[in-house]
Amino acid sequence: MSKVRVLIVDDSAIVRQILIRELSKDPNIEVIGSAPDPYEARDKIVTLKPDVITLDVEMPRMDGITFLSKLMKHYPIPVIIVSSHTKKGADSTLNALEIGAIDVFEKPNMSKGENFDDISMLLREKVISASNANIKRKIKMKEEAEKKTGEKRKIYKLTRTTDKVVLIGASTGGTEAIKEVLTALPPDFPGILITQHMPALFTDSFAERLDSLSKITVREAKDGDMVREGLALLAPGNFHMVLKRTGGHYYVNVKNGPMVHHQRPSVDVMFLSASKSAGENALGIILTGMGSDGAKGLLSMKEAGAYTIAEHEKTCIVYGMPRAAVEMGAVEKILPLDKIVANVIGFLNKSG
């Protein structure tokens, strides 16, 4: 395996030093350079030809969003956004993911004295995963989304009521995939639980954006929230979300706990809880993402009688989590992203 060549773009010398140090711990990664702003980065991209770029979104001279837009148009390359833990940073990061960035990583907060070693492994995994990302697919999704702007979005319809619970897990590339699924759902769709690998605060902004685009209500989950028709609950960053049942009603527990697959929230944690609490009444969907989080949980759901779907490799930004689930025998249907909602609606109408 050849080393993944990384260029770091950040106006903070301290952050650049930290990223260089942590990424260099992996023998499969080579930091080939760094730049304090997009102008210097532009020249280094041409001469050094990196495989992956880490990019700050808040920089002088030219902001990261403007630079990313130019980069995706003229020199598309996998980009990981390294963003500050602020509301402004979260909103800018979501814009970057829509433009073409592959993933997001939370910038270390030096004022809080964070132990960066605890999360540096995740950063290295993200970089290696980004190097294998389908950047052409990412650009195509952006172009398709732009074409749909202003068009009337097709909303599928349910012909029967159902008490099923739908659970969706995703990671790298998942923000746009989840958006495509949710914006096609009718307002009376069954309750949904979503776990997307994202840092804290980013999930709240992501939920707000999804809510503004969808017919259903979407919000970040709170401990004790009831699962109900027309509502999608998104696991908050840095917390696991589990499905519980009391009588004839479902609700969620939002809790702390050890990371699973270096992730919190974890898709496996959510899926495993659904296999126990909902059994055959659940429907599990695993979308694009790095690693194998969710595969064991989806298998547990299938063994409990749930209907399970994985996104097809041809539409995945990173075919990691779906591949692991398929290889484990956890999947009943393998579908391209644009066919998933129609299949789910058909299944619910038959089973309702």
Image (cartoon, rainbow, N blue to C red):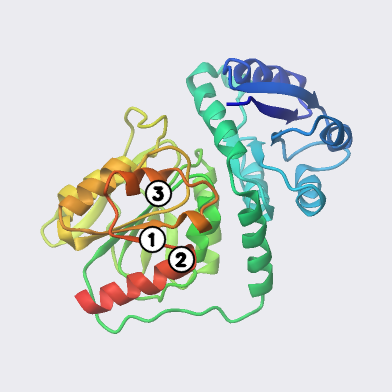
Question: Is 171 on the left-hand or right-hand side of 41?
Answer: left
Res. 228 visible in picture: yes
Q: Earlier in the sequence, mark 1 or mark 2?
A: 2
Above or below, 88 against 212 in this view is above
Secondary structure at badge 1 equals strand
Which residue matches tag 1? 232
Q: Where residue 16 appears, x then y in whole percent?
A: 72, 22
Question: Is 294 on the left-hand or right-hand side of 21?
Answer: left
Question: Is 177 on the left-hand or right-hand side of 242?
Answer: right
| Disc 3/disc 2 C-alpha distance (Å) | 19 Å
Q: Residue at x 37, y 43 (%)?
A: 324
The amino acid marked with disc number 2 is Leu
Q: Residue at x 62, y 30 (%)?
A: 107
Which residue matches tag 2? 182
Which residue matches tag 3? 322
In the rendered image, the quadrant that contains the N terminus is top right
The amino acid marked with disc number 1 is Ala
Q: Earlier in the sequence, mark 1 or mark 3?
A: 1
> Dot 2, crowdedness within 10 Å: few (<14), some or many (≥20)?
many
| Disc 1/disc 3 C-alpha distance (Å) | 21 Å
